[in-house]
Image (cartoon, grey):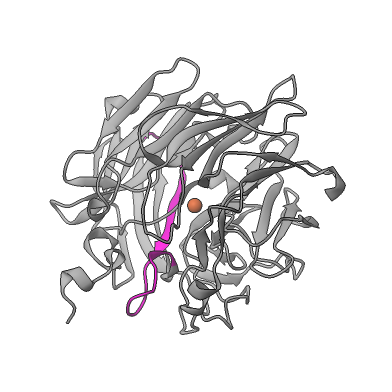
């Protein structure tokens, strides 16, 4: 039996996996669920089926979902994604390049009437509205590379823009599917080498790749862990490609060395300046294990510049920056994020933030000492403008050792939740979630 000090953090406290799949109906609600909300909230995370994994990021994907209709919380379900790894396939140096060797544990999206569970080393796994696994989705055999956990849906065209990165050539491939989910184009993007590329950015006119100094590390790969490490010498740059253009139009712009898991949004303005808001770490995956927190940071790239201007927008440590996705690629005024103001043992996060980047006002809701949120997604009010809608996410409550699905009015975060849906069990700390309106399914 291991003592606590030997048990990795991702097997303890509210990171500890849950052992069973559960289903519960007609969940109790404190407050009132906005009647306009009709759909599914689904959130993915690592939940090893058996034993420990070498890293938190490597556990089997488990999706937790709550169905909401007519002001009621119809059901809660949690289901493992039935991947080959769920059925026993191991991630080894030999299987690492197999795009069907997947844990599908990182995020959930909905596009072209499909719900997809994603992990960045593999093909998407399609799941149903009831969270049952359908199987790999490879765009009718057309997709030959992994699929990022952070694709972007263009609100103007309905297209799905995404990329796949690998540690052997071609290192990076950019893809576009149309609004019906047909793969339209795949384009190899020349980079210096294999780097960890977790997210990217889309504007109405450009797609932007982040080549940052977290580089492939063969030693870590041989240990079957996350095969990347920080480099002091690799440099950091952004690759900017006009949408629809050939690769000869790709240009690179330098940024100060850093790491970014998550882009909040990007947009361009009439003078051609590209603006990108990110959660920026000074460094990451350092060999000395030192950790830094991410700050909301803005890169500005005027036309013909060779280096991005950089402004830190707030001093607080944050993660999981999100916007109203109706504004993907368009100018946004509001960014939502989690306040990363706790220690790791207690789930890292203590509050929900709403940044108004026009007025400079920041709203904050502190969940209190016993509660820890996971990522919050924005559920837009039908037909309304930016920021009109609700923020939805799971919050673990240590006092009752269970979680709530918590709903805020997006414009009034500091006023506290409008509804708390009580789940019959806890939802472990996880990764990304999505609000999937019924009308899109
Ligand atoms: Fe992510």
From the viewer's side, name the closer residue of 201 and 42.
201
Residue reaching furthest front?
233
Residue 383 in the figure: left or right of residue 288: right
Residue 429 in the figure: left or right of residue 312: left
Residue reaching furthest top?
359
Vertical placement of 22 versus 162: above or below? below
From the viewer's side, name the closer residue of 12 and 426.
12
Residue 37 lies within the magenta run? yes
Residue 385, picture quadrant: top right
Residue 284 lies within the magenta run? no
Vertical placement of 367 versus 68: above or below? above
Exactly how many numbered labels are in the figure? 0
Q: Percent from the top left, x then y, of residue 174?
A: 73, 54
From the viewer's side, name the closer residue of 164 and 50.
164
Residue 70 visible from this viewpoint: no
Q: Quadrant of the N terminus?
A: bottom left
Residue 132 visible from this viewpoint: yes
Residue 20 in the figure: left or right of residue 2: right
Residue 409, picture quadrant: top left
Magenta stretch: give its range. Answer: 34-57
Vertical placement of 122 versus 333: above or below? below
Q: Percent from the top left, x then y, of residue 422?
A: 24, 49
Q: Residue at x 41, y 37 (%)?
A: 337
Q: Percent from the top left, x then y, of residue 28?
A: 24, 48
Q: Residue at x 31, y 28 (%)?
A: 364
Q: Residue at x 43, y 61 (%)?
A: 287
Residue 240 in the figure: left or right of residue 97: right
Q: Percent from the top left, x then y, of residue 249?
A: 84, 43
């Amino acid at each position: 039996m291991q003592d606590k000090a030997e048990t990795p953090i991702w097997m303890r406290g509210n990171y500890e996996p849950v052992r069973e799949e559960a289903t519960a109906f007609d969940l109790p609600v404190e407050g009132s669920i906005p009647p306009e909300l009709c759909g599914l909230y689904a959130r993915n995370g690592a939940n090893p089926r058996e034993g420990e994994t070498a890293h938190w990021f490597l556990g089997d994907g488990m999706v937790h979902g709550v169905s909401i209709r007519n002001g009621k919380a119809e059901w809660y379900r949690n289901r493992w994604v039935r991947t080959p790894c769920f059925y026993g396939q191991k991630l080894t140096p030999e299987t690492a390049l197999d795009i069907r060797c997947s844990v599908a544990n990182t995020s959930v999206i909905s596009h072209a009437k499909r719900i997809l569970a994603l992990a960045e080393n593999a093909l998407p796994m399609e799941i149903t509205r009831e969270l049952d696994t359908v199987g790999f989705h490879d765009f009718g055999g057309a997709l030959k590379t992994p699929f990022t956990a952070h694709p972007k849906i263009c609100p103007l065209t309905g297209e799905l823009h995404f990329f796949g990165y690998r540690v052997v050539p071609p290192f990076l491939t950019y893809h576009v599917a149309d609004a019906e989910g047909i793969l339209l184009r795949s384009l190899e993007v020349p980079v210096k080498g294999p780097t960890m590329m977790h997210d990217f950015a889309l504007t109405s006119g450009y797609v932007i790749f982040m080549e940052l100094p977290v580089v492939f590390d063969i030693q870590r790969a041989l240990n079957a862990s996350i095969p990347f490490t920080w480099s002091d010498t690799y440099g950091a740059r952004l690759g900017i490609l006009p949408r629809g253009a050939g690769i000869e139009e790709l240009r690179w712009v330098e940024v100060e060395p850093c790491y970014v898991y998550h882009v909040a949004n990007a947009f361009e303005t009439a003078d051609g300046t590209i603006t990108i808001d990110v959660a920026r770490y000074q460094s990451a995956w350092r060999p000395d294990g030192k950790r830094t927190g991410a700050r909301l940071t803005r890169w500005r790239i005027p036309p013909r510049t060779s280096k991005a201007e950089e402004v830190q927008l707030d001093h607080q440590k944050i993660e999981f920056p999100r916007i109203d996705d109706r504004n993907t690629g368009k100018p946004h005024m509001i960014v939502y994020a989690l306040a990363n103001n706790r220690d790791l043992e207690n789930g890292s996060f203590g509050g929900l933030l709403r940044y108004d980047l026009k007025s400079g006002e920041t709203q904050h809701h502190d969940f209190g000492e016993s509660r820890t949120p996971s990522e919050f997604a924005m559920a837009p009010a039908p037909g309304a403008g930016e920021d009109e809608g609700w923020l939805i996410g799971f919050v673990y409550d240590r006092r009752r050792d269970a979680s709530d699905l918590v709903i805020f009015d997006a414009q009034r975060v500091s006023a506290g939740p409008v509804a708390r849906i009580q789940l019959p069990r806890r939802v472990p700390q996880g990764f990304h979630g999505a609000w999937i309106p019924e009308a899109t399914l």
